[in-house]
Amino acid sequence: MASNRQTPNMSVIADALGVSAATVSNALSGKGRVSPELIERVRAKAEELGYVPSVTARALRTGRSGVIGLVLPNISNPLFPQIAQAIENAAADAGYGVLIADSSGDNAKQTLAIQRLIERQVDGIVIVPRLGTRIAELACPVAVIDSPSTPNNTVSADHWQGGQLVAEHLVDLGHRDFVLIGANPLSNVQNDRIGGMKSRIPKDGRVDVIWIERNEMVLGAGCPLGLKEKVENGFTAFAASSDLHALRALTELQRAGIRVPNEASVVGFDDLVWSSVVSPSITTVRQDAVAIADIAIGALLATIEREPSPEASNIAVAQCNRVPMALVPRQTTARLATADASASDNSSFANSSSSPPERNAP
């Protein structure tokens, strides 16, 4: 049998406390002149009675839905659930819900996901763009999380600086011959990571870059990357733009009978959940997803809440648009037996710039 009990409204709470419904509304919303003691009493009574705020009523009152959208490029990548959780937590702390859409790495799906979120009248959207795409003005406020060199980027990890950390770590261990591994050269993030690595490789070092998708177009998906041959040619450091690619490199080297880290060192990016439990555990670079999410949500809400203006951009701008990354040394990197004690001398670095030049909008 269905229950006849109705969800209590603000008037029920007001009658129970002997105050006005307006006072209850102000206490629950944090607005108006209501004493902290009364706010505590109102909220306690609301919880006791099982009061649930009406989202529809709030939307009618404020003109806002209390919901933001989040568009991710590939939810199957272990990195993006971490970002989604950080965004959801930051939004919840600000009183917002989150609708998540996955573009599955497809431009058309990304555009459709954005359109559908706008149709659902979200107050704003956080977008992690598919590689090679640029987010322009939308019909609602938007925060972009990609790379500092990306046009209209709101905030992101400092991928260039993260790449520098990788190279500096390997150089300090005595390495001078580097294979840098990325997936797709259209990715601003991957280009910045590899660019950062290159900027910290000594002038007397060797560098070879492998783009996985280019290899696979010729040799097929999952093809060997030719890492055994690289080791035979004297390369000892293998630095990938993702832990996923680092694991692929590690597996290929081990299957070829090459000992890691005794004969070759491997580094990844993003400190994915399994990177610390594989054997050997992967040296990597971690991004601060919580800090990035907090900055992105803060910038987005500031854009949502400002006074409307035809001249104002809907792209959220943050005071800090890059968050430093942190090196996490583990078992896949070690000092070369023949390492020169002077290898860590920073004066030999080819380029000491701390960040890449901003890319011009196409």
Image (tube, grey):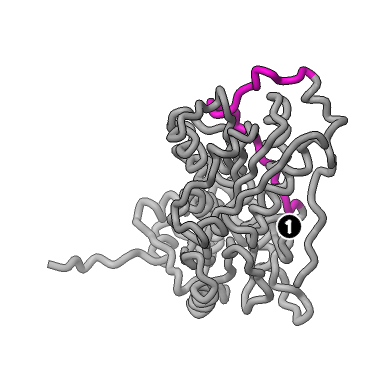
Is residue 2 visible in the rendered image? The answer is yes
x, y percent for residue 143: 64, 63
User: To which residue does mark 1 refer?
Assistant: 318
Q: Quadrant of the C terminus?
A: bottom right
Query: In this picture, is 233 found above or below 245?
Result: above
Furthest-right residue in this view: 347
x, y percent for residue 9: 39, 66
Q: In the shown orientation, is residue 8 left or right of residue 208?
A: left
Q: Residue at x 64, y 56 (%)?
A: 296
Q: In the shown orientation, is residue 260 left or right of residue 13?
A: right
Q: How many marks?
A: 1
x, y percent for residue 22: 53, 67
x, y percent for residue 148: 73, 55
**Mark 1 is on which residue type?**
Ala
Q: Residue 317 falls in which quadrant of the image?
A: bottom right
Is residue 60 visible in the rendered image? The answer is no
Q: Quadrant of the N terminus?
A: bottom left
Magenta: main secondary structure: loop
Q: Residue at x 43, y 49 (%)?
A: 44
User: Magenta region: which residues?
Assistant: 320-341
